[in-house]
Amino acid sequence: MDVVCEGKDFSFPSQEEKILSWWDEIDAFKNQLERTKHFPEYIFYDGPPFATGLPHYGHILAGTIKDIVTRYQSMTGHHVTRRFGWDCHGLPVDHEIDQKLGIKSREDVIKMGIANYNEECRGIVQRYVHEWEKTVVRMGRWIDFRNDYKTMDLNFMESVWWVFAQLFQKGLVYRGFKVMPYSTGCKTPLRLKLRLRLIFLQGLGLYYHRKGDQLLGLTRTKQRTWCCGTCNGSLERETQLRLKHMYFQALFKLPFQMYQRLSANRLEGQLFRFFPNGLPRQPRRFLSLSFGFRRPPFRFLQLCILQNLFITGASLVGKKYVPLFDYFKEFSDVGFRVVADDYVTDDSGTGIVHCAPAFGEDDYRVCMEHGIISKGENLIVAVDDDGCFTERIVDFSRRYVKDADKDIIQAVKESDTPLIYRAVPSWFVAVEKIKDQLLENNKQTYWVPDFVKEKRFHNWLENARDWAVSRSRFWGTPLPLWISEDGEEIVVMDSIEKLEKLSGAKVTDFHRHKIDHISIPSSRGPEFGVLRRVEDVFDCWFESGSMPYAYIHYPFENVELFENNFPGHFVAEGLDQTRGWFYTLMVLSTALFGKPAFRNLICNGLVLAEDGKKMSKRLKNYPPPSEVINDYGADALRLYIINSPVVRAEPLRFKKDGVYGVVKDVFLPWYNAYRFLVQNAKRLEVEGLAPFTLIDQQILQKSSNVLDQWINSATQSLVHFVRQEMDAYRLYTVVPYLLKFLDNLTNIYVRFNRKRLKGRTGEEDCRTALSTLYYVLLTACKSMAPFTPFFTEVLYQNLRKVSNGSEESIHYCSFPAVEGKRGERIEESVNRMMTIIDLARNIRERHNKPLKTPLKEMVIVHPDADFLVDIAGKLREYVLEELNVKSLVPCNDTLKYATLRAEPDFSVLGRRLGKSMGVVAKEVKAMSTEDILAFEKAGEITIATHVLKLSDIKITREFKPPANVKAEDMDAKGDGDVLVILDLRTDNSLLEAGVAREIVNRIQKLRKKAALEPTDLVEVFFKSLDEDETCSQEILESQEQYIRDAIGSSLLPSTLLPSHGVVLAEESFHGISNHSFAITLARPALVFNSDAIVALYGGNTKFAHGLQTFLLMIDHHNLKAEFQLGKGKIKVNCIEDVPPVDVVLGEHVFLTVGDYFSSTRGAQ
């Protein structure tokens, strides 16, 4: 493995760029597809976005979810085709072109030519494709842009035609009217899901005067020109008017906006101001409206006063009334009468509304149900496609509805043109016919989170209405309907072949300007003329809903691929698609095949700005994605958004600092653990040992080291959990578990195993620990590869250099499988050990006892005998070393050092017990020690007829010090069933150990200050600066083993530093635990036995000096290697005029001062 840099010098974004270049060089994604082509198919449907805008965090989020799932499925033995798609038709494209070309009306399009208009649209649909590809690729997502699909491609459009033809053949298509939001600027109906504020034309409250058997309707409306009145006939008591004087009025001018409301009282006050004959005493709701006004420009007309008038909703049903205008008087037989419906309520408005079937969805439904209009009949619509009144409205003919009412408040509109509701002739898919099957198919799907399926989507399906799939536009997939002039003959095209066969024309493009001229001879004979295509195009949602078939050109191609793998395995989009793409997928697949379109679905929430508002380019309230990626890397961004509420369909307040937190808390510790492995593997070579090679995993599984056993088991638990949760598509549970595992790896295994990994417990043990760490890191990388594809690739490319036969890329590897046994007991014991360590640290902090201060004893109280065996045996050394305590005493007598107290968990029991809570709480608090112990053993207790479980009662253990110990000399802290007790008393031996830890601490800091790597070999020299040096000397002797273990070598007297030694750093320290001393760090230096060397040359000191000079000139590492090669002896015969001699290591020369020091002490 190659040497790696420090974490502070590791640039995550730069490394990601290098990986991207390398992936391009080896064509990694294409190769992965080729390697898995014989595996079972995993079908993923990618919803097509519009390329007329730039990608934002919502797209990045959905793309990351899709990439994680598909990468995981590829690693678990599936072939996953991933093709990007583009939505090329629809209002966003039309709107941009209309703005660009100044299009105001349909006539403008006709004048410039449909062909010219459509080609303009074609020219912008892929305006930002390059930016999209750049962002998607930079985020690490593997998806095919070269073989993408577009909804404007001929093959895609042909499959859309086929889908429609199938529905037509099944009797699920009809022509009718749909009351929809209608854009007068875009000249087309819109889907309700679009975020457009609606502008209602002039409306009014209806009030009536009885005239014989008729009601005089006092309306002045422009849009709603013929209507019936609707009241709530069931609310008889609420709508009864018990007024002595009754005022009937009409509001001649009434502007309102749905998103502004005033209280009824304030509005009533405005109404009262205009009554010339005094105010009613009890206006009740009859005089209140819930619509809001900025300036109420009212003019009221007092018509009459009725004495003691009683009117109920039911009494009005069936009554006729006289319309204010006579534009539609020929409809008086069926219209202009009062009907009842539950959608009219008494909690807003007057309890009476008027219905205009051409301008309201409920209006249309109510009029249908009461026989005022019939389904499918042509409605009289008083507003044309440009939003102007028709000739029939003689007083306002050809006037734009906005201009006809100057007082209507200008609303904020997304399309910059007003919206109105109007009945539009449309072609419908009869969704209501298949509603029961839709609900049943929804049950067959699996959603994450499930509440979106069970509530939001279920409710939407339950209230599904017939779907108007046609739009009166120019750019889109044309409806494949050819109709005769008399409307009696309809031919539906389902393919290019059929159209060419019936028309005799060659077809290469389905867009309007390419096929509108094509006619078909009538099958009834020449006298019936020809059939021509209807002018409408498809709702673009019909096209995207056809994506599972159209993107592979089914049924014209890929029949076996589709039929063997339908429904698709996986889709993922945002919460808004429950009423969009998810819905259209479900409708079309149910109508075509009686199946859902997908099996598994992940629904994400909305990414908001940090302040909780919607992200806005104008407000600049969020950092651009490119900025975040360039600063912290794509992996950090991926992990940040995936490990957030947004994956559970909840909103995320995006914070750039949160992405930095991922780098700091996840990637840097992970990188440091990897770097520690590489450094210590290279150290073996530096020390002249055999290069690092892997030990077989089967052997490692049998390691006697408890932390090896623990980390191996924890790794298997990780693999088991990730597989389980990823198979269930619960990404939000996987990431926290992965992060906890990495935290344990760095802060438990690496931290507690530093001695072993550094070789201080022997070479064999070191290689076992290094191999264990290697496999754990490799498994972690493979498990995290779908989530962090760049960083795991960086680590893998270096790790694989010591593993023969490894895959070229980590993304070609199989996902780890569970191998070997999982030791649940040892995992639980280590978790408890960490709890004990945290509790002990808390006690130290409470008493201002830093970890550098040794303590005499700690007692662990726990009822589990197996755990006490582990903590007093296998785990003992780690606890004592980490907490700097000399001895550990296990105790399973839970009452020896503690008293037990029971408290009811009010958060759990309060709601459940209600009024009984007080009685139960009193008895729980009064439980004796014996009662508590019996309860813990039994697992439940009955109090006041209520059965309480262990989760209902909190048992706390309060410390009870021994009788002969002062309170300040001992303290404890507990957590659940464990109690940790520390003896805080000190003695001389503890003070000496404390000084030794301080010395080690200063040595480590000096190494860091000198910028030394852990693999850099140095010798450490100590000099006491105290007047009495004997005290320091005694401490060094008594703590020698601890210091040697801590720094990896002996602490040497400064007097042994040779004159030719190279000093790397030195520093003096004063007042450290009442001691002063100097520390010197020097490179390993040769020490000569001068007498022995002189003896080699028969007493010739000149020759002896020449040999020493020669040896000092040789590189220290090379000299060490030569001695190893010669088994501790080298022959020196290359010094001119000096006889050859054999130099023996340890007799004539020592490679380090430490070797010499140990030799002389051993001789003593």
Image (cartoon, grey):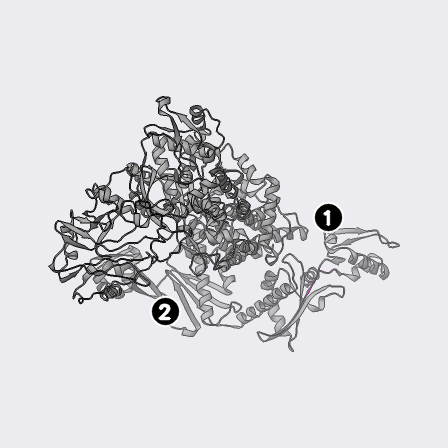
In the image, residue 612 above or below residue 191: below
Check the image and name the residue furthest to the front: 394
Q: Secondary structure at mark 2?
A: loop
In the image, residue 544 above or below residue 346: above
Cα gap from disc 2 to disc 1, whole angstroms: 65 Å
Question: Looking at the image, which is closer to me, 417 or 904?
Answer: 417
Residue at 53% of width from left, 51% of height from top?
Answer: 634
Residue at 66% of width from left, 47% of height from top?
Answer: 690
Q: Secondary structure at mark 1?
A: helix
- The answer to whether residue 88 is visible is no
Which residue bears the numbered disc 1?
1125
Check the image and name the residue furthest to the top: 525
Residue at 61% of width from left, 62% of height from top?
Answer: 1047
State the image coordinates of residue 1025 (x, y, percent, origin top left).
65, 75
Which residue bears the numbered disc 2?
960
Question: Looking at the image, which is closer to me, 863 or 615?
Answer: 615
State the image coordinates of residue 238 (x, y, percent, origin top left).
16, 57
Q: Which residues are magenta?
A: 1080-1086
Q: Is residue 415 left or right of residue 1009?
A: left
Check the image and name the residue furthest to the bottom: 1027
Proximity of marks 2 and 1: CB atoms separated by less than 8 Å: no
